[in-house]
Amino acid sequence: MSSVLSIFFLAAAIPAMPPAPIGDTLPGYPKSPDAIIFEFTDMGGTTSSAKAKVTPESALSWCENWRAGTGENMQACAKAVLDSEAGRVYEASANCQTGDLWVDGKHYLFNGPDESSQFFAGYASVRDAETGKNVGMSNAEGGRELGAKWLSLCPMGLPYDVFPVQSTFKPGPDESLFGEYMGHNRSVMFHHEKHHVIVYSDPKPAIAGAIRPDTVLFRGWHVPGEWYSGVAYTFKKNCDPAPYLVSGHYQGGPTLTLRGKAPIRDGCKVVGYSDKGASANLVFDLAQH
């Protein structure tokens, strides 16, 4: 990693981001038809914004999931859903630096991991900007979906004013080490759980020229024992790290796998993305210390 890159990455308020996930679902009420993102601007930035709408495919999928077995014709059901959604666009926007979120004309503030819900502890939560009250995590209150919208708009998780963007990370002198060691492709990693980052603790010799200790491999959000989502990086000596979106569910057992479409390089330039290859499937050995 070049010294110029290191200085830039440490000083940058807004990180470089991968392509926005056009075609993904914008999180919403779990029993409603999926709204599919068709426009995304400034993902991960100070004016991150997404627009989504119900499509023929998502309407049919909803009917097959919720109306199967009722005797209703699925195509007729999908048409009825589309008719009811005609002209409707779902929108959400955020300032990923300050923690501000706007959905359906309402203003919310990122509020860290939920600490009050019995079933959704650790999920990203928000509070009402006007009242200061936390938004509950039940389906009726909608807090879980609002937190998920924040992570779609701001996949690096914590607002940058709370946790600045850095190419390397280690706790400050007054912070204790909180997390777990794990293995990854013969390197020793450390997952800083409070900050939702995974760093190289002891890179294997073959990559030591491109990656130094405490280099961030992943930054995003995780719920212990459940799921991870965020931004990972590929590295090449004398090139900028290349970001890409990853996610994964912990299935139990000794390994965790985060999957995504990893960058394809021509020299240092990123020329495409692929779900094939080692970087598209980041496997962590949780039994290695």
Image (cartoon, helix red, strand yellow):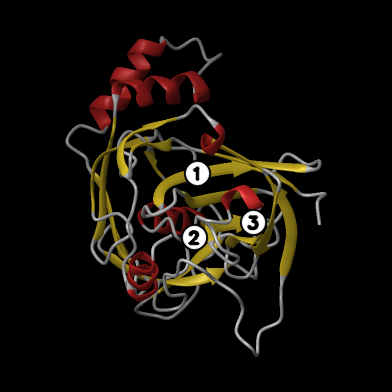
Give the Cα separation between the discs numbered 1 and 2: 23 Å
The reply to whether residue 220 is visible in this rendering is no
User: Secondary structure under badge 3?
Assistant: loop
User: Which residue is under mark 2?
Assistant: 143
Looking at the image, is 31 positioned above or below residue 218? above
- Eye-nearest disc, 3 or 1: 3
- Which residue lies at the image location 64% right of the left edge and 88% below the top edge? 173
**Tag 1 residue:** 246
User: Given the image, on which type of amino acid does mark 2 rest?
Assistant: Gly
Give me the C-alpha separation between circle 3 and circle 1: 21 Å
In the displayed orientation, state which residue is furthest to the bottom: 174
Q: Residues within 10 Å of mark 3 (few under 14, many from 20)?
A: many
Against 199, residue 66 (above or below) is above
Left/right placement of residue 82 relative to residue 242 reads left
Answer with left or right where residue 218 lies relative to residue 20: right
Q: Residue at x 62, y 70 (%)?
A: 194
State the SS at label 1.
strand
Q: Residue 37: which quarter of the image?
A: top left
Q: Is residue 32 above or below residue 113?
A: above
Q: Amino acid at mark 1?
A: Val
Across and down, in percent, residue 56 comes to: 30, 21
Say which of marks 2 and 3 sits in front: 3
- Residue 220, percent across and down? 51, 58
Which residue in the protein does label 3 denote?
203
In the image, what residue occupies the spot 50% across and 44% down? 246
Which callout, 3 or 1, points at the residue further toward the start of the chain?
Answer: 3
Three-letter amino acid code at the position of disc 3: Pro
Mark 3 or mark 2, which is nearer the start of the sequence? 2
Q: How far across and down, in percent of the image, does residue 54 sit?
A: 30, 32
